[in-house]
Amino acid sequence: MSGKIIVTGGAGYIGSHTVVELSKAGYQPIIIDNFANAEKRAVEGINQILNTEVTCYEGDCGDADFMEGILTKESSVAGIIHFAADKAVGESVEQPLKYYKNNIGSLLTLLEVMPKHRIPMLVFSSSCTVYGQPDQLPVTESTPKKPAESPYGNTKQIGEEMIEDVVKSKVPMKAIALRYFNPIGAHPTAKIGELPLGVPNNLVPYVTQAATGKLEKITVFGDDYDTPDGTCVRDYIHVVDLAKAHVSAIRYLEQQDSKSLFDIFNIGTGHGNTVLEVIKTFEEVSHVPLNYTIGPRRTGDVEKVYADVSKANNVLHWKAEQSLADALRDAWHWQQTLS
Ligand code: UFG
């Protein structure tokens, strides 16, 4: 058995899939979640998939006393994968301080407690939102960052910079920021998946809920972009592929002799798909026709963004394996367990 890996936000969408992949790879994942934007059923789903009971602490990873208590109890933690964060772009514009407090505050706490408890590795959830609308596609890790469009996006930029500064200060910490493109899909067992609160903001949960009839119709936000069919282009990655990237990141960090390092990787498929391609592919895999109309552009949307993933392929030896159709099929199976 390899080391203990704390997964903050381990009951959330990407966190829960990562807990499963860590365990399958021989690590001992430990979930920390305050269940503010996650449900206990995610932990039950993880336990069913793994046929074991994963350790789970309920609480806020931004609470230094709570973290001290866990780290005193759980000795020799090998690393932390930090997912716990608020993630609704629109909400962050309305409640910026909630985002700065939760997203920056939790990272700050972790960066303080990690050296104290000799935890050498950190993987941080970042986002392709740091690129804004890039001047050149696909985006590489050295593509210049654009000023953040939202407080949420700003917390990802600041988070990366905080980690980099801590590493530069020669604190013994090996850290990676993974810049996710658009995670979609669910576990193929349909035991875990995305559980959006209220009406979803993101395309795929909106599509799957529209397919069940829970939502009346999908509005495609604009069809006059400079793209093959006029709708926005994104790099949609299966959440299980994304989860596996975290295992690869941990493995890579374990292998590095340097005591202090910081690196950044794009995690996507390397391919862009339009909104209409997502809708069409969903209809093909689900055999459910979708009711959609074209509406105005959504404020803040970038026209097109997709990843150059050669750095993750070559350095982390990781590659997305699943197709858009695979991800949409799994998203649909998961949705059917909910309705
Ligand atoms: N879209 C629609 N109709 C909908 C919902 C979305 O047409 O009802 C379109 C959007 O305009 C966009 C595409 O579907 O073109 C994808 O939208 P999502 O909301 O699913 O994803 P975004 O790319 O806007 O946002 C995602 C994450 C953010 C992250 C951002 C980085 O949700 O957390 O990528 O670019 F910041």
Image (spheres, grey):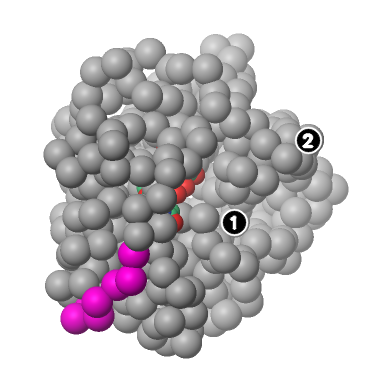
Q: Identify the image quadrant of the N terminus.
A: bottom left
**Closest to the observer: 156 or 92?**
92
Predominant secondary structure in magenta?
loop
**Closest to the observer: 215 or 66?**
215
Q: Residues within 10 Å of mark 2 (few under 14, many from 20)?
A: few
* Residue 132 placement: quadrant: top left
**Which residue shows up at 55% across the image and 75% down it?**
43
Q: Which residues are magenta?
A: 286-292
Task: Please tell me the numbered disc located at residue 97.
Answer: 2
Whether label 2 touches label 1, CB < 8 Å? no
In reply to whether residue 87 is colored magenta, the answer given is no
Say which amino acid is labelled 2. Answer: Leu
Say which amino acid is labelled 1. Answer: Gly
**Closest to the observer: 177 or 25?**
177
Q: Secondary structure at mark 2?
A: helix
* Residue 109 placement: quadrant: top right
**Mark 1 CB near ligand 1 (8 Å cut):** no
Say if 28 sits above or below 80 in the image. Answer: below
Q: Residues within 10 Å of mark 1 (few under 14, many from 20)?
A: many
